[in-house]
């Protein structure tokens, strides 16, 4: 199997997609995890309210990010880790929205990245009562999920893609995309940034 990509998951301080407070990254090569990374992020000042609902979900408080890197200072490291890989996330529109909205809020440029949604893939691959990440990850054989831990969530998203590719004999992400009719999408910066900027507290959590 030559399935290569990087899975990503963000946690946010509140309903604003520009309030990223943590990220998890898992690099996949030949269908296996080869590197993991996670760190906390100090949200931009206009988006740094930590709502009790969000804190209860991921356990990250304002105090825990007080000495963390800002979005501006950590984005180069994030983009270096991603390289030219396709991003994989569960409900990828949410995580792409966080990436873009946080960059828009801090006036940081983002390259035209590609992304693939493991939620859409799971809906086309499994017969489940729910396609939330914990349920879909278990169907994929990933049973050690710590939900809303960003690195664990990223690895769970990766497991769904790897499992489905294995079941179908897909030798790369492009083949899997075609077999399941789940597009590898490309960020169109103007339209995506406009969309990310208008997301509200109704943003869903995978």
Image (cartoon, rainbow, N blue to C red):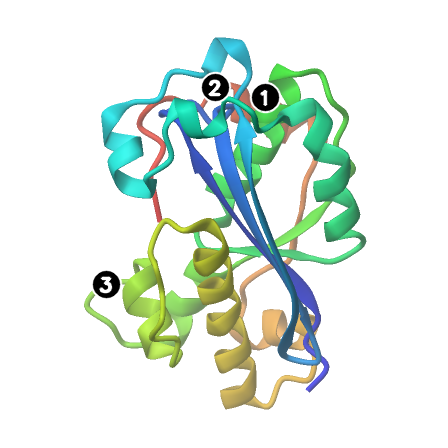
Task: Please name the residue shown 69% across and 33% down the image.
Answer: 74
Q: What percent of the width, then of the height, locates residue 198?
A: 47, 19
Are the residues at dot 2 and dot 1 in contact (C-beta closer than 8 Å)? yes
Asked if disc 1 and disc 3 are in contact, CB closer than 8 Å, the reply is: no
What distance separates the C-alpha of mark 2 from that of mark 1?
7 Å
Instruction: Please give the label number shown on residue 130.
Output: 3
Q: Residues within 10 Å of mark 3 (few under 14, many from 20)?
A: few
Mark 1 vs mark 3: which is more N-terminal?
3
Secondary element type, mark 3: loop
Q: Identify the residue under disc 2.
A: 198
Relative to 105, residue 31 above or below: below
Q: Is residue 58 left or right of residue 66?
A: left
Question: Which numbered disc covers residue 194?
Answer: 1
> Can you give x and y, in whole percent of width and height, for residue 147 in the image?
33, 55
Q: In terms of depth relative to the viewer, which is nearer, 194 or 65?
A: 65
The reply, left or right, for residue 63 in relation to residue 182 is left
Q: Residue at x 19, y 68 (%)?
A: 129
């Amino acid at each position: 199997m030559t399935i290569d990509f990087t899975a990503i998951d963000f946690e946010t301080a509140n309903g604003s997609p520009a309030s990223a407070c943590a990220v998890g990254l898992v690099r996949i090569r030949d269908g296996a995890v080869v590197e993991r990374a996670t760190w906390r992020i100090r949200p931009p000042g206009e988006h740094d309210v930590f709502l009790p609902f969000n804190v209860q979900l991921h356990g990250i408080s304002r105090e825990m990010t007080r000495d963390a890197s800002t979005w501006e200072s950590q984005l180069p490291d994030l983009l270096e880790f991603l390289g030219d890989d396709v991003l994989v996330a569960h409900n990828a529109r949410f995580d792409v929205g966080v990436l873009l909205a946080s960059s828009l809020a801090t006036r940081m440029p983002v390259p035209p990245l590609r992304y693939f949604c493991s939620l859409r893939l799971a809906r086309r691959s499994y017969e489940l009562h729910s396609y939330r990440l914990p349920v879909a990850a278990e169907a994929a054989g990933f049973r050690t999920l710590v939900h809303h831990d960003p690195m664990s969530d990223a690895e769970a998203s990766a497991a769904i893609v790897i499992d489905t590719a294995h079941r179908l004999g897909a030798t790369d992400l492009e083949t899997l995309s075609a077999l399941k009719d789940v597009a590898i999408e490309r960020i169109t910066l103007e339209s995506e940034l406009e969309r990310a900027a208008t997301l509200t507290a109704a943003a869903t959590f995978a």
